Image (tube, coloured by chain):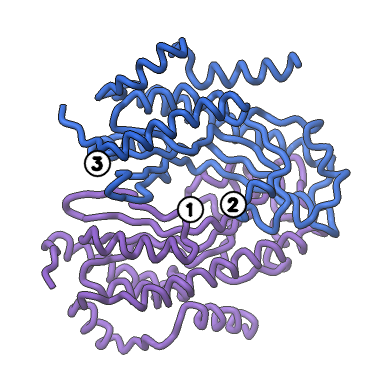
Chain colours: A purple, B blue
Amino acid sequence: MKTNVSYTWKTRKQRSWRRIWEDLEIGYLDRDLLPLLILMNRDEEIFTTSSCSGRITVMDSEFPWDRDETNIIFKSHIPVELNDLNFIFKYSPYKKIWIIVNGPIIHFYSSSTRKASRILNAARRIGFKHSGIIHATKTKGFFVELITGIYLTQLIRTRDNIIISIDNMKDLLTTFNSALIEGKNRLQRLFLELKKILPENVDEEIESDLRAKEISLEKSPIEIFEEMIKSKNNS
Amino acid sequence: MKTNVSYTWKTRKQRSWRRIWEDLEIGYLDRDLLPLLILMNRDEEIFTTSSCSGRITVMDSEFPWDRDETNIIFKSHIPVELNDLNFIFKYSPYKKIWIIVNGPIIHFYSSSTRKASRILNAARRIGFKHSGIIHATKTKGFFVELITGIYLTQLIRTRDNIIISIDNMKDLLTTFNSALIEGKNRLQRLFLELKKILPENVDEEIESDLRAKEISLEKSPIEIFEEMIKSKNNS
């Protein structure tokens, strides 16, 4: 099958691919995202960029959309317990304390319109309803965002007032954790759905790198998510 | 300038255009959205579909993304006072009570890639950062969503517990109202920005309909928003 993959594009893909493994090594990558990233990058016409498997964060900022990583004072890709968040009530906020949960967000470039559309349609069908093409450029191809509607925020305290007392946090966390898990289930569905159509044009460089790394392709996102929870409970 | 506007597309545009005025008549349209809708539809290669100028809603649902209009038990396109929401604490919820504020969301079809991209880029530059092409079809052209990151939710009560007491609602509403106003300011910026580039290919049918309706094109979104607040305070 004829592909339309330029030299620059290939260089960008190599850089993004290396980045995944550097992030993994320094513990910066959500491990439950890895099966999907590998699956997508195994196709020659796709490379992924900064993505998220779904997480709960605490921010100290005027609003949650003031998205500067320095505002994030806590983050977790697995369910959160009250113990994890006690510090919020001992700490004097700089602006406002928010808890946020977001579902999975996947970003990728594709050099093929047809492939970008096919993935978009598959994703939309299984609950990534807010997905779209963010950008189209000559050198990088189509930049696509796959995103669900799963997103909650909660104002916990301002500088002067506690809006949610520690007694009410338990109920709140039950709701936030179940939203997180709903996101992880959709990530799993996306993985299973894209596995039916990818990789289409196998990227031989990625394949040989995976063999060199001796990476198992057996585990699914939800299995790794369950491992992550277990390893927290055992530590 | 050559345009690429088919018969079907034109019929769809006429239907959407009529719908705006029907919605306005039954009080279903956010009036402060009208200047932008008119501006965009005056271009032959664009028609708008369901959009929102930004609003505060109260939902009774498991999660805020269970987007069924029957779950919405209150909505307002202008700032909300505590009085407006007292009913929440007298009412026994079916599922959970959420307050949600969202910034403006504009949906439109364009028969021209170039125009869709130009509008997308302008919108992204002035704070509609999550905008993208949602869909591309042969008959309807490009379906575009212009959207900001302005979105907050707050869990107020479950069936068994009150998470936010009425005493804490005042602080919460201050924050939610200022998010609403931030959204209205971005809508105004979008209007002023698109006014520089639209209408490009004037749609004569829309122009003659506007003359027949004797619609003033003078007012901007924020002026109408201010009128809406005044008329509430006087009523």
Instruction: Examine the image and state in which quarter residue B115 appears.
Output: top left
Question: In the visual, does B113 lie left or right of B161?
Answer: left
What chain is tagged by disc 1?
Answer: A
Task: Give the residue at x 46% y 53%.
Answer: A130
Compute the Cα span from label 3 to label 1.
Answer: 34 Å
Crowdedness near tag 3: few (<14), some (14–19) or many (≥20) residues, C-alpha within 10 Å: few
Foreground pick, A14 / B137: B137
Q: Position of residue B11 (x, y in %)?
A: 35, 35
Q: Position of residue B226 (x, y in %)?
A: 60, 18
Task: Please state which amino acid type lies under the numbered disc 3.
Answer: Thr
The quadrant of the image that shows the N terminus of chain B is top left
Foreground pick, B108 / B12: B12
Task: Give the residue at x 68% y 48%.
Answer: B70
Q: Secondary structure at mark 3?
A: helix
The residue singled out by tag 3 in the image is B113
Q: Secondary structure at mark 1?
A: helix
Q: Earlier in the sequence, mark 2 or mark 1?
A: 2
Same chain for mark 3 and mark 1? The answer is no
Task: Give the residue at x 42% y 23%.
Answer: B38
The residue singled out by tag 1 in the image is A69
Compute the Cα span from label 2 to label 3.
Answer: 38 Å
Do labels 3 and 1 touch, CB within 8 Å?
no
